[in-house]
Amino acid sequence: MSTGALAQRTRSGCLVSIVPVTDFDATTSLLAASMGEQRAWDAIVGQYSGLVWAVARGYRLAAPDAADVFQATWLRLVEHLGDIRDGSRLGAWLATTAKHEALALMRRNSRHVPTADIDVLGGGGRNTSTSVDDGLLRTEEHSALWRAFGKLSDSCQRLLRVIFADPAPSYAETSAALDIPVGSIGPTRARCLSNLQALLGALA
């Protein structure tokens, strides 16, 4: 199976699915894909390509390196299609695999591997409201937003990229991608968005 025809690169360097996904069932798609059904494979890639790309870009990889991680992750899935029986775990498996591929590439390139713990961002569990439009995080055309985004901690950048992948990942998938407890995702998301809002205000 080839993933080359299933994604395209935008002007900003992001790979996006070109396969529409409706009524997706991961377990059924896994079984069909393992039997060589191309439409099932297309559906899997369409459902999870945003998550895989977000994990890769979350490590501040250049677009070509992130594309290598993206492709390597799907190749790993091809190799293990027969091993994954529970479709509910597929997104987490892909997120974890993308993370491992990104870290391996960074080690090969002798790059610094981020070690900041997302839980040390401070604050705690209070709900923080923000006027940041979630939709803005799905495009890299908003220059002011992305200047502010670049000033966030690496851990916040990774979290926000993953959370705002399209389609949105589950908390279990986000937890697998970032190695953080499910219970800390909501409060930390609020904290990171609050920090982003403050940075946007400073740039205004």
Image (cartoon, rainbow, N blue to C red):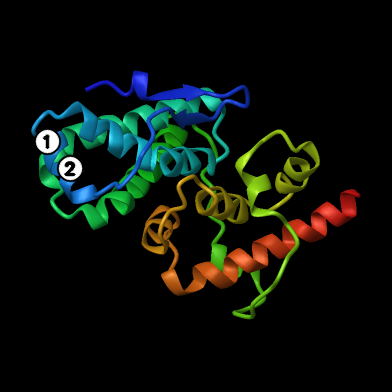
The tag on residue 18 is none
Q: How far is mark 2 from mark 1, CA to CA? A: 6 Å
In this figure, what is the number of numbered marks? 2
Amino acid type, callout 2: Leu
The image quarter containing residue 19 is top left
Q: Secondary structure at mark 1?
A: helix
Mark 2 neighbour density, 10 Å: few (under 14) some (14–19) many (20 or more): many
* Vertical order, 55 against 19 (above or below): below
Q: Which residue is mark 2?
A: 30
| Residue type, mark 1 in image | Ser
Q: Does the CB distance between marks 2 and 1 fall below 8 Å? A: yes
User: In the orientation shown, which residue stands out farthest toward the right?
Assistant: 204
**Residue linked to disc 1:** 34
Give above or below for 70 relative to 149. Answer: above
Residue 153, can we see it? no
Residue 80: percent from left, percent from top: 16, 39
